Image (cartoon, rainbow, N blue to C red):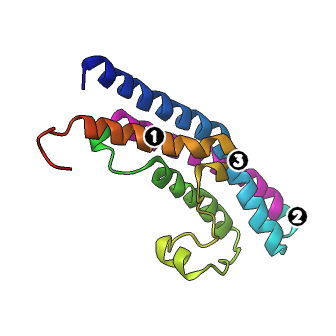
Amino acid sequence: MDEKAARDLEREINEVGDAIVAGVERELPGWVRAQIARIADAWGRLDDPTRARLDADAVTAGEEATVRVVGELRALFALDAADQHATPLQVVRTAYREPTATLAAVGIPAVERDEFDERAWPDDRYGLVPHTLADLGDPDLAPMLLAWGMAKAAIVRSRQDPTRPS
């Protein structure tokens, strides 16, 4: 692969990474607040002062989740493509931590989840793990994961020894 093509691939993966970070940074605070409200509404047993405190704590949880997840995404994208051993979705899926702690702090019990989710995310007591980037609220984020994966694969493939069978 020539240098221009390699630079183009690097530019592409950087642009996609930047778009994912921007989308997560924009959508995650609202997603956290909405998930906390959804679970609290479904449970329906909080008194007014506790619900008001939960709603205020949801804002803080959204901010904390966003700072942490965006920081982890930036750290992932700062690595060389070959060293990016997690996917952006794996990082985003950890966003359940802050709302889980917030809901547990007011005594809302865990929800019933299917066996797969219980095995895959045992600490996600409320079934909050996003299954796609679009789950955060912006459908345009979903294809960004595919674009990132394709760019990463193209970069890694371009560096392989052409004499080595694939």
Q: CA distance from mark 1 to mark 2?
A: 44 Å
For the residues labelled 2 and 3, say whether their Cβ atoms are less than 8 Å apart.
no
Under tag 1, what secondary structure?
helix
Residue depicted at x 61% and y 64%: 100
Closer to the chain start, of discs 1 and 3, is: 3
Any magenta on residue 130?
no
Is residue 120 visible to us here? Answer: yes
Is the residue marked by circle 1 packed among few (<14), some (14-19), or many (20+) residues within 10 Å? many
Q: Would you name the residue on which mark 1 appears?
A: 148
Tell me: 69 left or right of 86. right
Residue 48's disc number? 2
Residue depicted at x 75% and y 51%: 56
Q: Which residues are magenta?
A: 50-79
Query: What is the residue that sits farthest to the top in this orientation?
Result: 4
In the rendered image, which quarter is residue 48 located in? bottom right
Between 157 and 111, which is closer to the camera in this rendering?
157
| Residue kind at label 3, given as amino acid type | Gly
Nearer the observer, disc 1 or disc 3?
1
| Residue kind at label 1, given as amino acid type | Trp
Between 22 and 4, which is closer to the camera in this rendering?
4
Is residue 75 visible to us here? Answer: no
Residue 108: x and y, percent?
71, 74
Residue 145: x and y, percent?
51, 45
Is the residue marked by circle 3 packed among few (<14), some (14-19), or many (20+) residues within 10 Å? some
Residue 137's disc number? 3
Q: CA distance from mark 1 to mark 3?
A: 19 Å
Residue depicted at x 38% and y 41%: 76
